[in-house]
Image: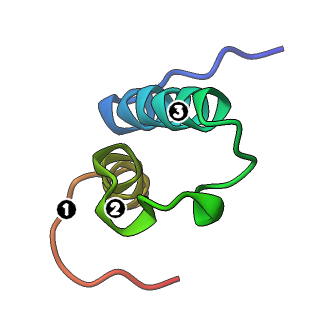
Amino acid sequence: MSEQILDEWQISLQQKKLALENCQQQQHLKSCLSCPKLLECAIRDAYIKAVYDSMSKGVAGGFEF
């Protein structure tokens, strides 16, 4: 089994994902969509930014799926 080396964006993503999952557990939610603070949540916003950063490796500009 080969060991995967994580870059700074993947590490940040893992940290933000863990924070998001912890928040969901504390609020007894399975999804952020059930949360009344959905549109103003700093934890979720940080996670979304980390997802995009990990996919683009921090390069600004357009992003295509």
Position above or below: 11 against 60 = above
Disc 3 residue type? Cys
Position above or below: 49 against 17 = below
Disc 2 residue type? Ser
Please state if 8 lies on the left or on the right of 31 as rendered: left
Crowding around mark 2 (Cα neighbors within 10 Å: few <14, some 14 to 19, many 20+) is: some
User: What residue did someone put label 1 on?
Assistant: 59
Residue 23's disc is 3
- Front-most of residues 44 and 3: 44
- In terms of image quadrants, where is residue 11? top left
Q: x, y percentage for residue 5?
A: 51, 21
Q: Nearer the viewer, mark 1 or mark 3?
A: 3
Disc 1 residue type? Val
- Front-most of residues 12 and 34: 34
Crowding around mark 1 (Cα neighbors within 10 Å: few <14, some 14 to 19, many 20+) is: few
Q: Earlier in the sequence, mark 3 or mark 2?
A: 3
User: What residue did someone put label 2 on?
Assistant: 56
Inter-mark Cα distance, 1 to 3: 29 Å
- Mark 1 vs 2: CB contact within 8 A: yes
Query: How many numbered dots are placed on residues in this image?
Result: 3
- Front-most of residues 16 and 44: 44
Inter-mark Cα distance, 3 to 2: 26 Å
Please state if 2 lies on the left or on the right of 19 as rendered: right
Q: x, y percentage for residue 54?
A: 40, 50
What residue is shown at x 70% (from left), y 36% (from top)? 28
Say which element carries label 3. Answer: helix
